[in-house]
Amino acid sequence: MKKLFFIILILPHLLFAKSDPLSNYISGGKFQSDALLIIKNNKIIFEHYNSPFNQSKKHLLWSVSKSILQILLGIAIDERRVSLSDSLCNYFTNIDTRKCNIKVKHLLEWTSGLNWSETYENSIKESSVIAMLYTENKSGVTPFILSHPVISNPGTRWYYSSGDTNLLSAVLSKVYYDKPLYPFDLLFKPMGITNVTFETDRNGVYIGSSYLYMTARDLAKIGLLFLNNGQYENQQIVSNEWIKFSTQIVSAFKENPERQDINDIPGHHWWLNQEIREKNIPKPWPALSSKTIAARGHWGQLLIIDPTQSMVIVRFGNDRNQSIDLNHFTRSVVNFAREIK
């Protein structure tokens, strides 16, 4: 794969009138972006930052971190350090034996069956994730997550959970005991991503649910990795089989689609743009192809990859008071990109 930065940098004030839909996501728009980067056919066709962000300043990814942890799991599976069929009891001792039925695959699907509340600022007292990140982690995130009881059979009910993700991270910390810097050694450094921060808990477990910081350009490289079937500059970082597996709808969700958000069509730690005809669920973003996958994070962080249009979209934001309309956003980007030759 050729290097990314065949740059076409387009000044937004030359492109957008205030009536243009994409202007909502640039300076002064309803959903002003901290960063917006659009790549098509391996070229940057649009790049814009709002202060204090720029090309070299990292941004907190929030739950986009989950999808990058998923790549690290794929690498571990390629190296045969871990299997999707492994039980939690292979890795954690002195836990409720019922949790032995939870497999790595269930964590990846968000179908562990653990009693978890993935709520945020609007219901702090009930929120498991806020307790995990801020108030109940004195012994590390793993003991806190494992203290939650099992309330449904693993693999039978889909529920988006930062707890499941951080248990996956804890598994990876154990299988890479000999490589404590495994995210950097196996993924970031081989891809030339050096300006990156990945926070850990006190036990060295990476907070894969939330605490990864990257620049927009470096996050775009992750998108290009998927466009190129797991390769970066002719180096196979993760197998093409893992890339394909990522885009399969979680079976428990397909059978019983309890959506927490209108954009929810879950793959394996990625969000998909596939319809589920038997449940009369259309694809969430009609302007993008059904092969599109996305990583989504709190307050408007986005990585969107559409292989059919050879397009990668990175958007950083601070949407604290309202949620971005992803259908409107993706349609606006596609309409803009269509005009760029």
Image (cartoon, grey):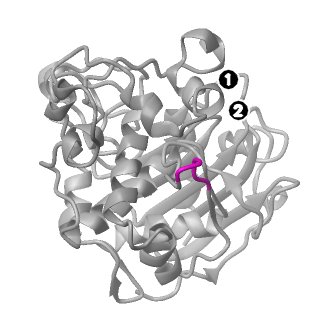
Q: Badge 1: few (under 14), some or many (20 or more) residues near its Cα, within 10 Å?
A: few
Left or right of 9 in this view: 232: left
Place of residue 193 in the rendered image (x, y in percent of width and height, measured from the top left): 58, 75
Place of residue 268 in the rendered image (x, y in percent of width and height, measured from the top left): 28, 45
Tell me where the magenta segment starts and ends, as one range: 199-203
User: Please, which residue is most extreme toward the right here?
Assistant: 51
| Residue type at the position of mark 1 | Gln
Place of residue 272 in the rendered image (x, y in percent of width and height, measured from the top left): 32, 42
Closest to the observer, 101 or 160: 101
Quarter of the image containing the C terminus? bottom right
| Residue type at the position of mark 2 | Asp
Q: Is residue 336 visible?
A: yes
Q: Which residue is mark 1?
A: 322
Q: Residue at x 75, y 69 (%)?
A: 55
Quarter of the image containing the N terminus? bottom left
Closest to the observer, 79 or 143: 143
Is the stretch drawn in magenta largely helix, strand or loop? loop
Left or right of 43 in this view: 284: left
Relative to 294, is 198 above or below?
below
Q: Residue at x 35, y 89 (%)?
A: 234
Q: Which residue is mark 2?
A: 319
Quadrant hosting residue 245: bottom left
Q: Residue at x 82, y 61 (%)?
A: 14
Q: Is residue 105 visible?
A: no
Left or right of 6 in this view: 282: left
Q: Residue at x 40, y 50 (%)?
A: 169
Left or right of 30 in this view: 146: left
Relative to 180, is 172 above or below?
above
Quadrant hosting residue 339: bottom right
User: Please, which residue is most extreme toward the front here?
Assistant: 94
User: How far is mark 2 from mark 1, CA to CA?
Assistant: 6 Å
